[in-house]
Amino acid sequence: MLDSQYFSAAHATPYYQDEFFNIWKFPTTKGKKKQEKPIILNYSIMTRAYGTICNRDNFVEYFNHEGFDVYLMDWGKDSLFTLSGWGVDKICDELRDKAVLPLLKEYKTDSLNIFGICIGGMLAAHMINKNMQDDPKFAKKFNKIAFYGSPILGARDLGIAKTFLTFYKQMKPFRKSMHETGISLFTLDAYLLQGISKSLLEWSWNQFAEEGSKTLSEMVGLTLKDRWVPFAAFMDLLEEAFEKTQVEDGNGFHFKGNVKNIHFYNMVGDSDVLVMPSASIVEYGSTVPQQFASFEQDIFVGGHFIFAQPGFQKEKKRLAEWFSA
């Protein structure tokens, strides 16, 4: 695994580690007045988390510069045998028990901040919705929440939704028998090639590169060596994102319950082909902003993996200042 090399170079230290996942701490920049509420950076379970910090001027650096300690959720390991039985509910319970509750106690604060990228935002929303069923005041544990390319607020047109929904329906009969295992990103790449063009897949992986480009074979090779996704969690996500919305109102799942205390910031790439803008953008006239204490939206020029590239400085600075305001 390359985790230790990447995160050591990024001046991160392990906050929590077990056989399933890591939490990496990025302490605030020296000399800056420390913020009272840290930021949890909740990343997708489908890609390695070092994509968030492997370039200059990344989000973490901007948050640190504003005085925030940042805690990065790095889901999963490289071994298939550590994925036994993991589903979305389990992941969200771990997010709550290993990050949210301990950090509230450690920082002696009544609320934290969350930045969710892609499926990381979906998981954060699911965690809050799930826990509010038992504790209606659970949302009060969060002060500010920002999402980047998260497929939960829009009309659910997800670009490659047809491909993933077809995969879900084909694999559904094996859901129970494969609950204890995982699926490699190499396999997902191969399947995606059946539903979308090779040029689109290559383009999306090139967006993930620090600078320049890498060939499709190199990126697929990296996923083969580097990443297993829990099968149960992957099926849960597909069901929540695609299957359920086929029989419901088609509007996706939003925050449920009283989240009126939360300040919300939504970032959407206007040319995102993996999570189409219509899946995450809040349209004019939507009732979604009324759910929150305040609501802001930044529709920027770019695709899904812009956050993993150098540059994009204006948007990163704006978000960091919003968290600190």
Image: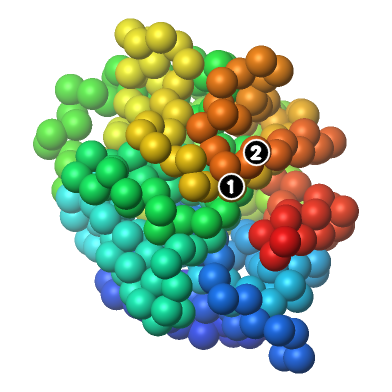
**Disc nearer the start of the sequence (1/2):** 1
Circle 2 residues within 10 Å: few <14, some 14–19, many ≥20: some
In the picture provided, is 153 more to the left or to the right than 323? left
- Counting from the top left corner in percent of width and height, residue 79 is at 32, 63
Q: Going 28% across and 71% down the picture, which residue do you hit? A: 19
Split into 4 quadrants, where in the image is the C terminus?
bottom right
- Counting from the top left corner in percent of width and height, residue 269 is at 74, 35
Q: On the image, which quarter does residue 243 sit in?
A: top left
Callout 2 secondary element: strand
Q: Is residue 275 above or below residue 92?
A: above
Q: Is residue 98 above or below residue 300?
A: below
Q: Going 36% across and 77% down the picture, which residue do you hit? A: 105
- Which residue is tagged 2? 295
- Counting from the top left corner in percent of width and height, residue 7 is at 58, 78
Q: Is residue 5 above or below residue 19?
A: below
Q: Is any atom of residue 249 visible in this view?
A: yes
Q: Amino acid at mark 1?
A: His
Q: Is any atom of residue 303 visible in this view?
A: no
